[in-house]
Image (cartoon, rainbow, N blue to C red):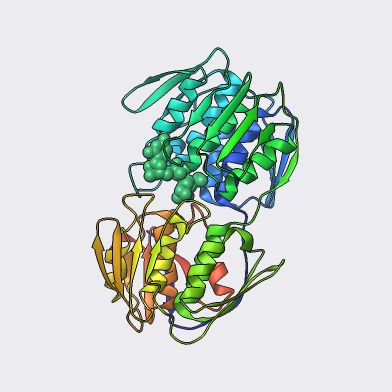
Amino acid sequence: MDAIQIYGGNCLEGQIRIQGSKNAVLPILAATLLINGVCEIENVPMISDVYHMLRLMESLCCTIERDGHTLRVDASGVSGCDMPSDSVVVMRSSIMLLGALLARTGNVSMRYPGGCVIGRRPIDLHLQGLRRMGVVINEREDGFDAETAGLNGAVHRLPFVSVGATENLVLAAVLAKGDTVIENAAKEPEILALCEFLQKAGAKIQGAGTGRLIVRGVERLHAVSYRVPADRIVAGTYLAACLCSGGEIFLKEAPCSQMKAAMMAASDMGARIRESEEGMLITCKGRRKMPSVLKTETYPGFPTDLQSAFLAAMTVAEGDGVLEETIFENRFRIVPQLCKMGARICCFENRVCVTGIGRLTGAVLEAEELRGGAALVVAGSAAEGRSIIYNRHFIERGYEDICQDLRDVGVRCRKTDFSEKDR
Ligand code: UD1
């Protein structure tokens, strides 16, 4: 069974270079389907979600060349609409291909997408929005067939903020006939990255990064080169690791301007943070303080994807604190795992109350999803003694090499595989 083994308990010291952003690159890869010609995408994180996306795109007749962290994607030959269901089922972002593929081919059949077990994660907003743009969608038990004779611009008022629905509707709108308005659009930096990529390719988009997007449909897009921005969630995970273990680390290329809420939470807990063009220097000396209340929100608020890593850091802070999740309903799955390490946490619906303890103790743990799994690695790095975290593959969905990154700051950890009988 794939796992990570850590001998933790020491302060962190050193430097980590932050990889390209998973949540930015996935919709950008989907956007290349709208372009005839070879797009060059640099700083692509080599993570399993990207491999799944590339496999899906190849099955649609895209030609993809890889040179290190650079991809050359040629979607000129895109024709098919049959996506391998195993990739669709493991990765929620496969839904991102829907808007672009409808613009390109006019019909798509797919299974409902999968992803993390952090909540129900329906796709109703995506489908409602596309119906409004002239797509006929027939839902089946395990998937749907979608067909359009041509996408038309429309006015969408999202009832709540959805990152994925905003991205899908932008992808459907750039080549649609007429104007599309998206009210209550998500403002996450990954939407801005997608819009920048599309604008570079000739799309007409106003209001990128705000709650109101206006897309004026154009006839065609042209090939471009684009560098994927650094991953604010990976950087935030290592910020939480420094909070949890103590020490001083430099996060090279950390996108500080996109991380204000996480930096503020870390400062409240006693971290000293210095930001610069090159990255983020974090110093954590002495025992961390408990934030009184930390709550997840849509951007620019504190990101739900960092909730678990900060929960790990809170378990060793001084005092009592509350962490509240407002985006996903099932995102406290790591609580029993952290309790195995000695953490004192009580759950109340979408809130947890934490009483800080001096130190965590290493334990045998099981990752159940991506961000929770990374948080267990954060906890294991700080815990006294040996921790084993099973199901490394969940973490590899979003972290290129979490063990190497942590070794760069002095953590004794490595990938390992155990047979069932070793457990
Ligand atoms: C994206 C991110 C994910 C992050 C999340 C919230 C990617 C690849 N993933 O996920 O890492 O945690 O944003 O910042 O970028 N919802 C519906 N119906 C829909 C769509 C969403 O009810 O059609 C609900 C979801 O269940 C959730 C909330 O809306 O409760 C927000 O989800 P959304 O912003 O869409 O998240 P994702 O795009 O899936």
Tell me where residue 201 sits by quadrant: top right
Residue positioned 71% across, 21% down in the render: 219
In the displayed structure, does residue 173 sit left or right of residue 328? right
Residue 113 makes an appearance in the image: no
Residue 235 or residue 68, whichever sits in front: 235
Residue positioned 54% across, 68% down in the render: 263
Residue 204, image x and y in percent? 70, 31
Residue 51 or residue 190, whichever sits in front: 190
Residue 184 or residue 109, whichever sits in front: 184
Residue 214, image x and y in percent? 62, 32
Tell me where residue 171 sits by quadrant: top right
**241 lies above or below 347:** below
Q: How many marks?
A: 0
- Work out which quarter of the rendered image holds the C terminus and state it: bottom left
Residue positioned 64% across, 50% down in the render: 44
Residue 349, image x and y in percent? 25, 56
**239 lies above or below 301:** below
Q: Quadrant of ligand 1?
A: top left
Residue positioned 51% across, 64% down in the render: 262
Residue 395 makes an appearance in the image: yes
